[in-house]
Amino acid sequence: MDAVPQIEHSNNDLKTSSSDNKTAPSASACAPRNPGVPFQPQWLDDVRVNPSAVQRRVTSLKARRSLKKAWQAAWLLKAVSCIDLTTLSGQDTPGRVRRLCAKARTPVNPETQKALGIEHLGLTTAAVCVYHEMLATAVTALTGSRVVVAAVSTGFPAGLSPFAARLQEIKASVAAGATEIDIVITRAHVLNGNWHALYDEVSSFREACSSARMKTIIATGELGNMNNIARASMVAMMAGSDFIKTSTGMEATNATLAASLVMVRAIRQYQNLSDFSVGFKPAGGISSTKAAINYLVLIKEELGDDWLNPQLFRFGASSLLGDIERQLEHQVTGRYSANHRHPIS
Amino acid sequence: MQVAEIYNTMSYGPAPESSEAVETWLQQHQQGFQLFIDGDWVQPKSAACFDSINPANGKILGTIAQAGAEDIDAAVAAARRAQPAWHKLGGHGRARYLYALTRLLKKRARHFAVIETMDNGKPIRESRDIDIPLAIRHFYHHVGWGQLLESEMPQLQPLGVIGQIIPWNFPLLMAAWKIAPALATGNCVVLKPAKYTSLSALMLAELCCEAGLPPGVINIVTGDGNTGELLADHPNVNKLAFTGSTDVGRRIRRRSAGSGKKLTLELGGKSPFIVFDDADLDSVVEGLVDAIWFNQGEVCSAGSRLLVQESIATPLIAKIKARMTKLRLGEPLDKNTDIGAIIHPSQKARITALVEQGVKAGATLWQPDITLPSSGCFYPPTLLCDVETSNQIASEEIFGPVLSVMSFRTQREAVSLANNSRYGLAASIWSENINRALDVAPQVKAGVVWINAANQFDAACGFGGYRESGFGREGGREGLYEYLQPLEHSSTTKAPAKSTKAKAPKLKSPQTLTTFPAIDQTAKHYINGKQVRADSGNTLMIKTVDGIDCGRVGDGNHKDIRDAVEAAHKAHNWNTVSAHARAQIIYYVAENLSYRREEFCRRLSITGAISQRRAGQEFDTTIQRLYTYAAWADKYDGAVHQPPLRGVALAMNEPRGIIGIGCPQEAPLLAFISLVAPAIAMGNSVVVVPSEKSPLVATDFYQVLETSDMPAGVVNIVTGKRDNLIQVLAEHDQVEGIWYQGSAKGSKAVELASAANLKHTWVNYGMDRDWFSSQQGEGKRFLREACEVKNIWIPYGD
């Protein structure tokens, strides 16, 4: 309960910034939250995913759209605005997190921004995403910026710590200033088809999040098949997730376009059924500009332009930003850039 | 546009493919393109020419020569001269040349993609990612066939000179489909590209020079329909391979009837796209994009009829409409274009007219709100709902980006609607239930079936249709057979074999005629498992060679044939009887026949005026032949192809349906069985007209059928004047194939009459076959003629 005043404060912040049309909308500016719906087993029974057709769709999509010059630059800037700049390592220190936060505030060097004519956008990444222990540092480092602080939680990455501890972890992170919580689910519920148990679990997490936005990591690489990915997505949304997220970044297989396609189609279906728009966050292994563009194209084609902003779309990434910066510099100078020319995060 | 503005709109920008190199190539040919004959570029004899136009902007790309009669003569002669050496070169040598050509094609892939897009109007993504790679794959695959030909198909030889006429929808790919198998098998070709799209073929001709292909092996003659007809009519062409419209295909069938030219026709379609309630609807929608909005819908195998289960029709149509708004239509050279230009204003006019007609007949039209380019030849993606089967657009091939929607209630109704078409090229079946999908696939009359997919092609998998979609297959082993003939064939075609005239036994007179008044013996027709009198009430007296009366048979007419076909149609369950059971019945026929050796030999000896020994030989060979096909019944397996996707393609040998058989005069029992047994072993039902001169042995045979558990209607026998009766069969639209062993004139008549519904024909052009020989009288050839190959694509994964 002690978290509540802080959250209201940050919400007020966001409202003022979103009313300023000239700057890019910040991460959680006023997207209506997904309140969830009562458990609907029929919505799961109706799930049908044909994996080979899904694979063909993503293969063809990669070749169907191409972005050149100004368009490529603009789309890459959009990708930057959607990044949850992440560090999730046992070696994390306050110093490392402060550097990351500085990068999140100024993700693209001002000269490049100027050359592209986008200084007025006030470009930042969407969020910084850290473990609970790093929250205090991040909150302090990002004070006054529009960058949101997110924490991974609920026994991340395996999610098998005591249930009460997982709930407590969420609450502690919210109290420490996280306005977004990335939770993990109990994969066993999916693998054993205990959909109601999954629903109850995610609902409890949602309640614990209070007004912090909840991103539910379903760990696509560990669910066995695409139909399970679709069903787990649907349950997570019914239970009130604000985002559904592919992976922790720690699984053997992290974000793939195919798994993402299954998830965004589930988002579309959930919107048809409930009228609520749920966000999507692919995470893990997205490190090239080409990959980032592929994801944006996937979102534009399957969900539409409404999803192409940080309220409804995020990249969970750490090294992607560096590749984008090099690409943007090339756009401006015509020269191919080098890693060492850009501040590391 | 400013970066900041795009940042807010997140629009796509222009992404043009460079056409610079191709423009330069076109510049070099500003004087006009010539004909490629005998390894050289030659000026056509007349000065006639026409322009090739970019349909997206109306610009002239080049001037194309119109080949006339003399030019075709020269091209065919060049191919003829080149062919023996090309054949003698051997499989490996041909593989080397084909490989050289393939490598060059691969190196120039981007140029070909660009010229294809400029000439045809198709999006660069498709020419770059689909047309050209598939063409290259086709050549590569056939390099391998060249290499393996002699070991894999040792009893076969090339046909000679092949005339090939290809359409404008996949110009280079169709050229590859035609040229690669022809060359691999040792034939030489004269190829005529479509009038609207000659450029990629001409570019390919340049590669032939570069690859050092011997002169005359490939000749490319450009021109319009007249040029095509000159090629089709040319007497010195051994085979015609045509891809195009059903109307032109039918005309080619008629014009070439009786000429002895082998013919493959790959024609139109109105392919069903069947969606069951347990399908992945989002994937279905993408499947439809591949099915009907690929290549502007100008695809013979386009899934133009959406058959959707009623319970999911509303959500599916909503999803389709949402997807259609995302299709990008416009400049074909832009990498972000999904739908390019229609080939020609006349085609656009045809699409427009058919759609208007369909709407007038009650269809509801829906088109997404996308702006068409202000100039150029474009037609928007179109959805037509509320289409009844009686609406012309439900049955007519539109060849444009137009999808007609119909609904069904049950699986059975889905199959009926799918098969309610004159065509039978392809089908898509969408269901997450593999049992259902694999149950429906064999029931659909189509040469290619895609399960949970659409418009997939591969060189290893045969492509071609049933019914009026043509005959013959392209790709795979089955495609190669279309370019080969048995070694034995060349000897039979040179001169008719002397029919065996054994010494007639000197019978004083048949016993029955002397001692007592003969028991009136009038054989009847055998229809639907019953002996029935001829509808005419007339009979024909059958005499021995020496003029002695030996019995009467019914004088069949068109009504008897009609009834026999009706009975054969009702017996369609025969193809669902297990191959093991069919084999058992055929063995049982052999067994029951063997008990009556003496009687049959006497009949053969008397009616045929042949020696008892010869009669015995014919009888014994007949028994052997029944064994052969009983043996084959459960062994003529299909194949499992491995196309480059996660999944398999099953090449299933399917019975054609009803085959009409006209028997030769000679070997009245052996030839009869040699034709009937393979047909029924593969699951066909037959209507047979036995030897006109010696039908009694066939009518005796129905008593054997009656005692052998042969289901009613599988074998129907109608006696009478063979050529008249076969004519009725050839004109019957329910009959799927005609086998005719008779005169040259009769052969021509069969081919002519079969053109109406483009049924499969197998005729002998008056050349006798040695029925006693195991090379000529039996074998896989007979089984191939008895079957259609259906390729069922089954992608998988979880």
Image: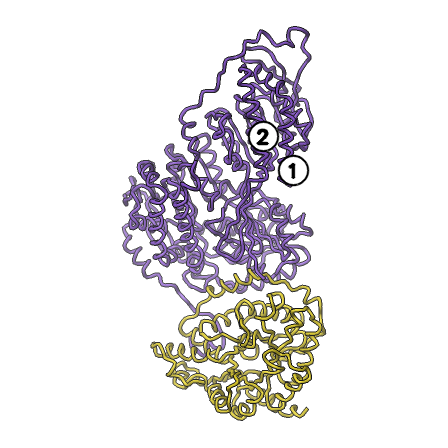
Chain colours: A yellow, B purple
Report the front residue among B398 and B720. Answer: B720
Residue at the disc numbered 1: B581
Disc 1 sits on a residue from what chain?
Answer: B
What residue is shown at x 56% (from left), y 10% (from top)?
Answer: B547
Q: Quadrant of the C terminus of chain B?
A: bottom right
Quick check: B297 above or below A169?
A: above
Residue B51 seen from this side: yes
Quick check: B749 above or below B27?
A: above
Report the front residue among B233 and B546. Answer: B546
Residue B756 seen from this side: no
Quick check: B549 above or below B498?
A: above
What residue is shown at x 55% (from left), y 82% (from top)?
Answer: A27
Residue at the disc numbered 2: B626
Do the residues at discs 1 and 2 belong to one chain?
yes
Amino acid type, mark 1: Ala
Task: Give coordinates of residue A280: x percent, y percent.
Answer: 57, 75
Circle 1 SS class: helix
Amino acid type, mark 2: Leu
How packed mark 2 is, by other alpha carbons closer than 10 Å (few <14, some 14-19, many 20 or more), is many
Task: Give coordinates of residue B564: x percent, y percent.
Answer: 64, 30
Marks 1 and 2 sit apart, C-alpha to C-alpha, by: 14 Å
Quick check: B495 above or below B115?
A: above
Disc 2 sits on a residue from what chain?
Answer: B
Circle 2 SS class: helix
Task: Give coordinates of residue B565: x percent, y percent.
Answer: 63, 32
How packed mark 1 is, by other alpha carbons closer than 10 Å (few <14, some 14-19, many 20 or more), is some
Q: Quadrant location of residue B15?
A: bottom left
Q: Quadrant location of residue B261?
A: top left
Q: Quadrant of the N terminus of chain B?
A: bottom left
Task: Give coordinates of residue B677: x percent, y percent.
Answer: 58, 31
